[in-house]
């Protein structure tokens, strides 16, 4: 099992869960969760996850990606983060930088989300200018890559998702 830990810029615990390690490829490390799993936000209660999904933690990139099984309305969900770090073989951690990019299953629409939260947290947490610039560049890159169907956002995730769906 792999403990997946997102934190906020001040180090506060954000979303976290345990997932099954699936493997690695050119895109990074893949983890999966069967239908009926749970996750938690900070010290809050368990949040049920009704559909299977897989996560991708790329090497030295400022994002992570989630690929959801049907009938979840969001097929692809990317978080703009600091590059994922592996303090041990059983834990991956990163700082959530608020901006997200999603592709909706029904329409194929790709959107940048949480720009208001990103602006608010720049002030609250004092994001350095370099972090702000990198997060904005990453969000633009993700928007184009997911919209254009670049891998791993088109089909590369499907064999991994088949392991847990």
Image: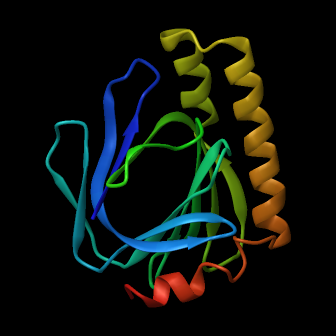
128 left or right, relative to 14: right
Q: Position of residue 124 (x, y in %)?
A: 49, 11
> Which residue lies at the image location 68% right of the left edge and 45% below the top edge?
61
> Which residue lies at the image location 81% right of the left edge and 49% below the top edge?
141
Q: Position of residue 73 (x, y in %)?
A: 50, 74
> Which residue lies at the image location 54% right of the left edge and 29% below the top edge?
117
Q: Position of residue 57 (x, y in %)?
A: 55, 56
The furthest residue to the left: 45
Coloring applied to the structure: rainbow
Q: Nearer the viewer, residue 33 or 125?
A: 33
Residue 2 shows up from this direction: yes
Q: Nearer the viewer, residue 164 or 116?
A: 164
132 left or right, relative to 159: right
Q: Quadrant of residue 35?
A: bottom left
Image quadrant occupied by the C terminus = bottom left
Image quadrant occupied by the N terminus = bottom left
Q: Quadrant of residue 15?
A: top left
């Amino acid at each position: 099992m792999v403990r997946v830990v997102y934190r906020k810029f001040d180090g506060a615990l954000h979303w976290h869960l345990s997932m099954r390690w699936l493997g690695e490829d050119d895109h990074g490390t893949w983890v999966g969760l069967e239908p009926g799993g749970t996750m938690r936000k900070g010290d809050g209660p368990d949040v049920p996850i009704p559909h299977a999904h897989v996560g991708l933690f790329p090497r030295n990139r400022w994002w992570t990606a989630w690929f959801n099984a049907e009938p979840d309305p969001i097929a692809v969900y990317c978080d703009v983060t600091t590059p994922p770090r592996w303090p041990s073989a059983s834990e991956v951690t990163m700082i959530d930088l608020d901006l997200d990019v999603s592709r909706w299953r029904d329409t194929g629409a790709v959107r940048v989300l949480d720009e208001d939260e990103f602006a608010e947290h720049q002030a609250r947490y004092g994001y350095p200018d370099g972090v702000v610039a990198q997060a904005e560049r990453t969000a633009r890159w993700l928007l184009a890559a997911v919209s254009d169907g670049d891998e791993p956002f088109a089909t590369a995730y499907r064999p991994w998702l088949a392991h847990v769906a």
